[in-house]
């Protein structure tokens, strides 16, 4: 009441409150994506990588299957995942007030553990 009499506004900037809530929600969606990645990694463990000298498939096997495996190997490489992560972070931050920002935050959170594990395992 005293602030109202003195002419001070108790709320500094009303538009800052929804922006903070939106940023917190996006952080929660990102953490949910990271948690789902970790859960999926525990439920469906990845097999150990095969030797470089060992061919991935039978040399007389299907050419389409071999091409498909090469494409998947490229998509799952570090050089594709990191720009994908940066693009999702940018889209989530730039579209903070829109509903599709949640999807971008979730996808960024989902790819973050992959990047973290890549850096951790690279040094050990």
Image: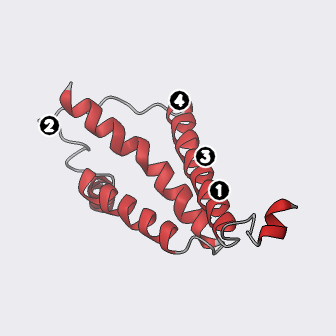
Residue at the far front: name it. Answer: 6
Per the image, the residue denoted by label 3 is 32
**Residue at disc 1, secondary structure:** helix
Q: Cβ–Cβ below 8 Å for labels 3 and 4?
A: no
Disc 4 or disc 1, which is closer to the eye? 1
Q: Which quadrant would residue 85 be assigned to in this image?
A: bottom left
How far is mark 2 from mark 3, CA to CA? 35 Å
**Local crowd at mark 4 within 10 Å, few (<14), some, or many (≥20)?**
few
**Local crowd at mark 1 within 10 Å, few (<14), some, or many (≥20)?**
some
Residue 42 is marked as: 4
Q: Nearer the viewer, residue 26 or 120?
A: 26
Q: Give x and y (percent) for residue 106.
A: 56, 56
- Report the residue at 55% width, 38% height from top: 40
First in sequence, mark 4 or 1: give its number.
1
How far is mark 4 from mark 2, CA to CA? 26 Å
First in sequence, mark 3 or 1: give its number.
1
Per the image, the residue denoted by label 2 is 52
How far is mark 3 from mark 4, CA to CA? 15 Å
Disc 3 or disc 1, which is closer to the eye? 1
Q: Is residue 64 left or right of residue 18?
A: left
First in sequence, mark 3 or 4: give its number.
3
Disc 3 or disc 4, which is closer to the eye? 3
Disc 4 or disc 2, which is closer to the eye? 4
Q: Nearer the viewer, residue 20 or 92?
A: 20
Q: Cβ–Cβ below 8 Å for labels 2 and 3?
A: no
Per the image, the residue denoted by label 1 is 25
- Examine the rendering and report whether any part of residue 80 can be seen: yes
First in sequence, mark 1 or 2: give its number.
1
Q: Give x and y (percent) for residue 4.
A: 83, 68
């Amino acid at each position: 009441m005293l602030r109202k009499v003195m002419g001070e506004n108790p709320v500094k900037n009303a538009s800052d409150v929804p922006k903070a809530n939106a940023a917190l929600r996006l952080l929660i969606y990102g953490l949910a994506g990271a948690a789902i990645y970790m859960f999926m990694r525990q439920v469906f463990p990845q097999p150990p990588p095969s030797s470089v000298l060992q061919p991935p498939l039978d040399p007389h096997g299907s050419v389409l299957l071999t091409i498909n495996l090469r494409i998947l190997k490229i998509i799952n490489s570090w050089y594709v995942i990191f720009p994908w992560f940066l693009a999702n972070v940018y889209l989530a931050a730039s579209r903070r007030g829109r509903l599709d920002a949640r999807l971008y935050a979730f996808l960024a959170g989902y790819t973050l553990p992959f990047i973290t594990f890549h850096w951790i395992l690279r040094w050990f």
